[in-house]
Image (cartoon, rainbow, N blue to C red):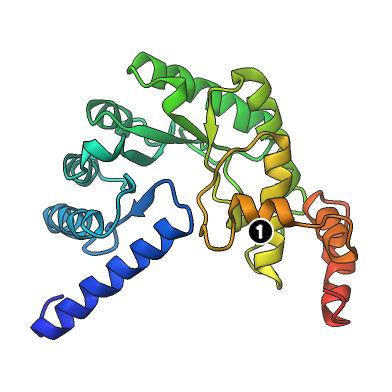
Amino acid sequence: MYGATDADKAAGVAYIQALAREQEAAGASFLDVNVDEFNRADAQENVKAVKWVADIVQKACAVPLSIDSSNPLVLKAGLDACDASRGKPMVNSVSLERAALVPVAAAGGAAVIAGASGAECMPETKEERIDNLLKLAALLKDNGIAIADTYLDPLVMTISADGTNGLKVIDSIRAMREHFGPTVHFAPGLSNVSYGLPKRPLINQIFARLCQDAGCDGGIVDPAQINAKILSALDLTTEAAQLIIALLKGEDDFGMEFITAVREERI
């Protein structure tokens, strides 16, 4: 808040803390903290920023923090600032591409979101996602991170670019649940699936329900829009739900049936 008045600073802190309290009240298990865009040119400024944000958020709520940074120095500073008495902090995220973050997470006693990206490229198929996550799980185990502290992220990509993207994630979740059993957790960025489409909240909720039915037990979400109560109340037999399910499963070529229904205000 460079150049801001004391009143401006107080208003900024109050705003951040209000958001944190709202997310906690809606059922968030972790609150994500990311300051990487604060100062791309100076990591030490981001180190100061992550400590500051962690402090004010933890003064507002009781849930543990998820530290989100691609910089090991910033990640370590964020984990060091976490109050361990409220539970393990989380690292969002590690992957084969970001393998250097795994020892930092392990040293910080953190749970981790394990992303399915490869060492050099993003996965395109279910098989590539599974292969990357199996390799990453072995790396996490070697660093002492238990499977119970691992939250798999099969990488949700928008169905507006590829109509099969939703089904690839659902199938990956089902396969990983079968492989790892009931102990592992999931934390995909569920709302990515609807980017570029109308009726995003409803698409996201139905996608979350389909993922839940496949074995998903969590996600990177706004808990005010996606939570257990909302998902259990969804009626998947309605015309709108059936159209969205077809869209998410790649059964609606180019989303034409869905788009037509939106234009005709049937959704």
Residue 224 placement, left or right of 181: left
Q: What residue is disc 1 on?
A: 204
Residue 59 drawn above or below residue 198: above
Query: Picture quarter containing residue 19?
Result: bottom left
Query: Where residue 122 appears, x then y in whole percent?
Result: 55, 41
Query: Where residue 58 appears, x then y in whole percent?
Result: 23, 53
Query: Where residue 92 appears, x then y in whole percent?
Result: 39, 43
Q: Residue furthest top?
A: 142
Residue 100 drawn above or below residue 93: above
Quarter of the image with the N terminus is: bottom left
What secondary structure is marked by label 1? helix
Count of number-bearing discs: 1
Q: For the point 32% across and 44% down, which residue is it? A: 64
Query: Picture quarter containing residue 257?
Result: bottom right
Q: For the point 85% across and 66% down, which residue is it? A: 240
Residue 132 drawn above or below residue 220: above
Q: For the point 28% across and 57% down, which residue is it? A: 36
* Mark 1 crowd level (few <14, some 14–19, many ≥20, 10 Å Cα): many
Q: Is residue 118 visible?
A: no
Choose between 120 and 193: the one closer to the eye: 193
Q: For the point 29% across and 55% down, which residue is it? A: 61
Q: Is residue 49 visible?
A: yes
Quarter of the image with the C terminus is: bottom right
Residue 259 placement, left or right of 117: right
Question: Label 1 amino acid?
Answer: Asn
Residue 33 drawn above or below residue 104: below
Query: Where residue 102 appears, x then y in whole percent?
Result: 33, 29
Residue 36 placement, left or right of 152: left
